[in-house]
Image (tube, rainbow, N blue to C red):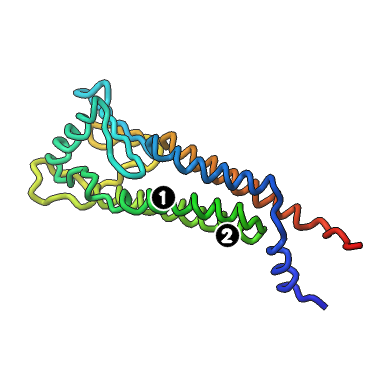
Amino acid sequence: MKTASQSLARRLETPAGMLPRAFLVAAALLVFVTYLFPLWNMTMFAPQYPQGLRLHIYSYKLDGGNGGQDVHEINVLNHYIGMHDLVSADFTEFKWIPFVLGALALLFLRAAVHGELGHVLDMVVLFLYFSLFSLWSFGYKLYRYGHDLAPTAAVKVQPFMPPMLGRRQLANFEVTSTPGPASYVLGLMALLLVVALVLAWRGSRKPAPELS
């Protein structure tokens, strides 16, 4: 008599079907789209900056509005309150996020080729872990930037946490933080993976054809 673990193990070895595999391939292709657009956007409005200062965070670099000049302007303002300069080289995330995304794309394609339910489940778990860890890393970076203030700064402010999402008033600046197009692409990838898993799971419930 089969045990529950044996039954589950056999089920995870069930072929996933063509449609779940196609969703895995689509998710892999979308990885390359994430390199083209920002993951996150931050805009800072103040009376002296009615048009706002814009910061665009890609998976591999920082960019600013006004032809990149906004990053320089933000760093000048940060200097007065003792914040560290925003420099791409200081973001270790820019070193590993592009690499991990590329590795995930290869793993998605590998899972599509092997095409078993267990492989689809592995991809969902890996992508979930990557997403949650990346969000934590982003939040921690914002926290450190707002709390590691130089004691010799010209303007003394209380340590603060820039918003990860939404709007917040920081001194005379209104800071808005929103996901960029690349984050929505990552959300679409997550949806494709979940749908692929659901379809593969449902397909595994069908009885195997009997051999004549």
Residue underneath mark 1: 135
Residue underneath mark 2: 122
Q: Earlier in the sequence, mark 1 or mark 2?
A: 2
Q: Quadrant of the C terminus?
A: bottom right
Count of numbered marks: 2
Q: Quadrant of the N terminus?
A: bottom right
**CA separation, marks 1 and 2?**
20 Å
Point 52% across, 46% down: residue: 28
Assess disc 1: are there few (<14), some (14-19) or many (≥20) residues with their C-alpha within 10 Å of its C-alpha: few
Of 200 and 82, which appears nearest the observer?
Answer: 200
Assess disc 2: are there few (<14), some (14-19) or many (≥20) residues with their C-alpha within 10 Å of its C-alpha: some
**Is 132 positioned to the left or the right of 57 in the image?**
right
SS of the residue at dot 2? helix
Identified by mark 1, the residue type is: Leu
Point 61% across, 44% down: residue: 23
Residue 89 x %, y %: 22, 48
Q: Residue furthest bottom?
A: 1
Q: Residue furthest right?
A: 212
Residue 203 x %, y %: 75, 53
Identified by mark 2, the residue type is: Asp
